[in-house]
Image (cartoon, grey):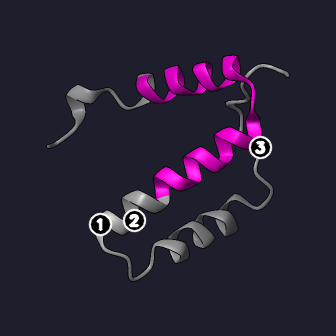
Amino acid sequence: MSPLTLEPNIDRPDDFYADLLAAHEGLTKAQSDALNARLVLILANHVGDREVLRQALAAAAETNPREEDPK
């Protein structure tokens, strides 16, 4: 598989974002978190390449450092 793509690559990204928000509409925080977890696992399964998934985890961790978490 090719390396992780971090450049914009979603057809009609605003429409996807609207779909994502709509999927969360009316959910509790716990339900929303569970939906996100399922979505991540479904997409990870679709990608299938462990090295690409490792790169994605590293990129996500770098983009959102835990020390910035307001919890």
Quick one: quadrant of the C terminus? top left
- The residue closer to the viewer here, 48 or 55, is 48
Q: Can you identify the residue that label 1 sits on?
A: 29
- Between tags 3 and 2, which lies in front? 2
**Relative to 64, is 11 above or below?**
below
> Mark 3: which secondary structure?
loop
| Residue type at the position of mark 2 | Ser
Q: Residue at x 52, y 26 (%)?
A: 57
Q: Is residue 63 left or right of residue 6?
A: left
For the record, the magenta segment spans 36-61
**Do residues under tags 1 and 2 come within 8 Å of each other at their CB atoms?**
yes
Residue 70 highlighted magenta (yes or no)? no
Tag of residue 32: 2
Tag of residue 9: 3
- The residue closer to the viewer here, 12 or 30, is 30
> Mark 2: which secondary structure?
helix
Place of residue 41 in the rendered image (x, y in percent of width and height, measured from the top left): 58, 45
Number of other residues with Cα within 10 Å of mark 2, as a class: few under 14, some 14 to 19, many 20 or more: some
Q: Residue furthest right?
A: 1
Q: Residue at x 37, y 32 (%)?
A: 64
Residue 52 highlighted magenta (yes or no)? yes
Q: Residue at x 54, y 73 (%)?
A: 23
Q: Residue furthest bottom?
A: 26
Q: Is residue 31 left or right of residue 42?
A: left
Place of residue 68 in the rendered image (x, y in percent of width and height, measured from the top left): 23, 32
| Residue type at the position of mark 3 | Asn
- Between tags 1 and 3, which lies in front? 1
Place of residue 55 in the rendered image (x, y in percent of width and height, measured from the top left): 61, 19
